[in-house]
Amino acid sequence: MTTFQLNGKTVSVDLRPGTTLLDYLRNQGFFSVKYGSDKGETGADSILVDGKIMNASLILIHTVNGKKIETVESFATGRDIHPLQDAFIEEGAIQCGYCTPGMILAIESLAREKKSPSNNDIKDVLAGVYCRCTGYVKPVKAAMSYLTARNTKVHKDE
């Protein structure tokens, strides 16, 4: 039996050995986690594991015992979307949308890791999420917009 937190809820599963976290999540209706390759090359299968960006297709379900898993579905509550999702909309950073969840999770992982990430930090973290539509200019702008607003809010709260 494998027990873990999935988007804030405790989940216990007993699945066959070799089942990937991607297979499990897709079967449970988490469609933000997409298949890109069996080698984790595209970042379309990005998730957060204990706050760090990882590829769900490369993780066997039994290895997440006791871990905290987040998908982009956890970022919105009803019609209230996460400020990073809003920044992507405002900057026109969403094209076909296939890679967008992975980009959002990658940027949020970076934001949790570093208080004031640089433009190069953003480009580095987005390099793990393959996109054919955007050319990365608008996603980088959206990330900077979000991080600037986030850091301003953090400093006001201190």
Image (cartoon, helix red, strand yellow):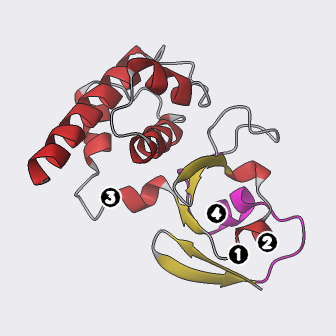
C-alpha separation, residue under disc 2 versus residue under disc 4: 13 Å
Mark 2 — residue? 62
C-alpha separation, residue under disc 2 versus residue under disc 1: 6 Å
Give neighbour class at mark 3: few <14, some 14-19, many 20+ (Cα, 10 Å).
few
Q: Residue 35, can we see it?
A: yes
The residue lying at 28 percent from left, 35 percent from top is 147
Q: Which residue, as the protein is rendered here, is positioned at the far left?
A: 156
Give neighbour class at mark 2: few <14, some 14-19, many 20+ (Cα, 10 Å).
many
C-alpha separation, residue under disc 1 versus residue under disc 3: 25 Å
Location of residue 148 (image quadrant)? top left
Q: Nearer the viewer, mark 1 or mark 3?
A: 1
In the drawing, does residue 137 fall left or right of residue 22? left
C-alpha separation, residue under disc 3 versus residue under disc 2: 27 Å
Q: Is mark 1 on a helix, strand or loop?
A: loop
Q: Residue 13: horizontal and vertical position, in percent?
A: 71, 82
Mark 4 — residue? 25
Q: Give the range drawn in magenta.
A: 14-34
> Mark 2 touching mark 1, by CB under 8 A?
yes
| Mark number displayed over residue 76 | 3
Give neighbour class at mark 1: few <14, some 14-19, many 20+ (Cα, 10 Å).
some
Q: Which of marks 2 and 4 is in front?
A: 2
What type is the residue that disc 2 sits on?
A: His
In the drawing, does residue 20 fall left or right of residue 32? right
Location of residue 114 (image quadrant)? top left
